[in-house]
Amino acid sequence: MDSPPSDQARWFAENVQPHEPVLRSYLRGSFPAVRDLDDVVQESYLRIWRAQTVRPIQSARAFLFRVARNLALDFLRHDRASPIIALDSLAGLPVADDRPNAIELLTAAEKSRLLGEALAALPRRCREIVFLHKIKGFSQRAVAQQLGLTEKTVANQIALGVQRCEAYFQRRGVEFF
């Protein structure tokens, strides 16, 4: 009879393994010179497993992709085969497809989700002000007029909202937004 999976194994199965298809696609597209993709993926799994045992990882996907990217670069350095060519201008590079790839779309979707969560965590009035100014693009004056507030109140609420959103992202391990 099989024993129940440990918390670590459950965490890994739920938060890391579902990203494998997109991770492989990202690595194939970004690092075509890497000879053994399986080694990069497996070493990435090992490193994220070890890191989670030391300290909880807030964004498994972001951590996994960062580790895999660094490992792929290490593999390329060791093989002395790099897909990066030094150019003065990127304009001369042939581009087959300008559409975002799977990892860019996933990242955009995850950023949108995180931003929505961060905004939802703000107090109602602060959320409304930040949404109107930062998302809808209204000026501080327009927000103040629409909500019947002073511009100073709007400015203070925007600063507070942005600060709280940044703290929200940091708690989840998001370095840039």
Image: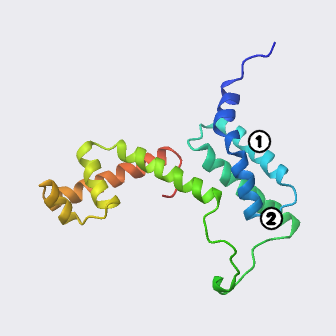
| Color theme of the render | rainbow
- Which label sits on residue 124? none
Q: Position of residue 83 (x, y in %)?
A: 78, 72
Q: Which residue is mark 1?
A: 46
For mark 1, give the secondary structure: helix
Secondary structure state at the residue bearing disc 2: loop
Q: Residue at x 71, y 51 (%)?
A: 23
- Above or below, 165 against 145 in this view is above
Would residue 3 be found to the left or right of residue 64 on screen? Answer: right
Residue in the image at 76% along x and 16% along y? 3
Which image quadrant is residue 154 in? bottom left
**Quadrant of the rendered image containing residue 71:** bottom right
| 91 left or right, relative to 140 | right
Report the side of 10 relative to 140 (left or right).
right
- Residue at label 2? 32
The mark lying in front, picked from 2 and 1, is: 2
Distance from the alpha carbon under mark 2 to that under mark 1: 22 Å
| Mark 2 crowd level (few <14, some 14–19, many ≥20, 10 Å Cα) | some
- State left or right for residue 91 relative to residue 29: left
Residue 34 higher or lower than 167, as above or below: below
Query: Residue 153: image x %, image y %?
Result: 17, 55
Q: Amino acid at mark 2?
A: Pro
In primary-sequence order, the first of circles 2 and 1 is 2
Tell which residue pokes out farthest to the top in this image.
1
Q: Is residue 70 above or below residue 118?
A: below
**Residue 27: where, in percent of width, then height?**
74, 58
Q: Are marks 2 and 1 in contact (CB under 8 Å)?
A: no
Q: Where's the N terminus, which quadrant?
A: top right
Q: Position of residue 103 (x, y in %)?
A: 63, 56
Q: Classify 10 Å Cα crowding around label 1: few (below 14), some (14-19), many (20 and above).
A: few
What amino acid type should be assigned to the residue bearing mark 1? Leu
Task: Tally the numbered discs.
Answer: 2
